[in-house]
Amino acid sequence: MNIFKQYLNTIKDLITKNAKKLELVNINALSGITIEIPPDKFDYDLSCNVAMVLAKTNKKNPELLAKSMKDLLLNNVKSFSKVDIAKPGFLNINISKEALSQLINKIIKEKKNYGSNLKDDKYNLEFVSANPTGPMHVGHCRGAVFGDVLANLLIFNGNKVTKEYYVNDHGNQITNFVQSVFLRLREIKFNEKFKNKKDLYPGEYIVDIAKKIIKTKPKINLGNLDDIYDDLHKLSITFSLDMIKNDLKKLGIIHDIFVFESDLIKNKIVEKAVNKLKDRDYVVEGYLEAPKGEKDKNWKKIKRLIFKSSVFGDDTDRALQKNDGSWTYFASDVGYHSFKISRKFNSLINILGADHTGYIKRINAAVKALTENKATLNCKVCQLVKLYKKGKPYKMSKRSGDFISVKDLLGEVDKDSIRFMMLSRSNDVELDFDFSKVLEKNKDNQVFYIQYCYARINSLFRNLKLNLNNTFEVDAKNFNLNIYERKILRKIFDWSKTVDLASLKQEPHRITFYLYDLATLFHSYWSKGNDNEEFKFVKDSKIKNLNSLIIIQLVAIVIENGMKILGVSLPIKM
RNA sequence: GCGUUCGUAGCUCAACUGGAUAGAGCGUCUGACUUCGGAUCAGAAGGUUGAGGGUUCAAAUCCUUCCGGGCGCACCA
């Protein structure tokens, strides 16, 4: 249930039907009208800009138009008890008591689904996709949480989502990785000291992988890498990926599908995708210009397949083949995206780290070329995370090189706090994460603040010996809400809109901000009873007004729904 | 240099894809509570939304030119 959409349609219909009466010639602009909660200082439930929008296209005075609309609304919409006009031409509306009680009953009925807008799209969401050459670090962590929560959000809003991880298990870096594992194996078996050469992976986690390989295949023949390469490749990737999966699991993240680059190549999916582009005349065999700026020693002028991505707005055309004729990373990714497209999603989403911004145009171009501009690919970029401890930059890395691993982070902070903090900023802004703050139990700590709000509600129900999960009916006869309850109720109505907007813009951080605001309203109301007897809602261990209790229950319902989307736990006692 | 992204209160950030007097938190200054209605609450001060120009009833938001920070600019992944 979304009351904004509901009443927006009511108003639109009414105005369309009465266009003549209102002397409106042009009502095309109706698509631009919105309904929202008015600013805090106005004591109204809804606010609509319709008069201002239509005044423009019909060359009318907005305030006069608003006046005639006001009468129209009051005479025709039963649920509106009051309509006023504010300065430039806003219509401010109050909903009648009867309608409000019905709306509340509806929300309580919907409960766990309240806020969902019952969309029905099929999304493909690719996220994390960290190279299996090493452990996950903090940079991956933000994208991981972002992707997972975005998936939860879209699912909550009614959609189907496939969560995918693309495993780059092919190419030079992987060859180097497997070679590093091989050398570590020899180190263990033959006591050959591992010498760190350029391009090899020195990290100690390679030793762990080697140890696991020896455990599963004690008799592995370490004479020559080439002889065992395929086997060793498979084992190394499996164990390395296990390490990543394990970190993800601790963060509460589980992917539906892992797609392996090597499989795409083996099964000719890359080749077929490139052929498709060839058929459409987006591929040429030719020469690329030498890269400008720094001179690249390895650069050779060789005839190769090139994708004309500049046709679709990319800065330059992109190579599909390397010097040796094998596919580039980009070519594989074209194959991967063609594989995604073949599975008929309405929308593809890629979550990328900030260092991949430059890649977006290229892959977008590929998707456009593959689908004749039909499919939509949306690349969301997560900016950097900077870690702090007590205000000082946090640099700790026991064994993973010069970055902080997720494992290190999980040793310092719990999963709930990490998840919440990763969404405490919009994704396109850098994030400072001071995790000493997250360990405090006060207002500084937003997770705590929201959890505490929920715990308080539970404590109230406990004291009243009532079950929070019970369904209560609004007492419509005595329906009088005080100003704090009205504010809370309006915020509750806003929940479905927040969910919808966050889904539409693919911005899960809106959920965290919303929940914090709701918690603030609640805490404020709660403490009113300290100053003023009138606002105490319990007397002699009994609830004074059932409607107050229901408002509070609504808060609990929305917090439950919201925290479930975030994947953050909600203790009933703290 | 090119691309991209951001620039909002002393600090960290919001702002419903153009709406009303631009909102929170931290910090500062006041006050309430002295404890399971508990780890909070109330109030005050704090702004030319980086700068200029444009579009309109209405701009932090759109266009444009600058200034400044991040990221990227492979046949790597």
Image: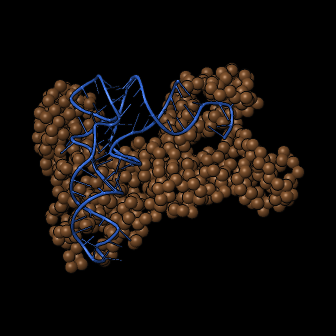
Chain colours: A brown, B blue
Which residue is at the front of the view, A431 or A504? A431
Q: Position of residue A561 (x, y in %)?
A: 39, 58
- Which of the 4 image quarters holds residue A71? top left
Q: Position of residue B11 (x, y in %)?
A: 39, 48
Residue that appears at 74% across and 57% down: A207
Q: Position of residue A90 (x, y in %)?
A: 18, 39
The residue at the far bottom in this view is A540
Residue that appears at 17% across and 41% down: A91
- Which of the 4 image quarters holds residue A249? bottom right
| Residue A126 appears left or right of A156 | right
Relative to B55, say whether A182 is above or below: below
Residue that appears at 11% across and 36% down: A68
Relative to A303, say whether A84 is above or below: below
| Residue A92 appears left or right of A173 | left
Viewer can see residue A433: yes
Residue that appears at 25% across and 63% down: A525
| Residue B45 appears left or right of A292 | left
Q: Position of residue B18 (x, y in %)?
A: 30, 36
| Residue A393 appears left or right of A324 | left
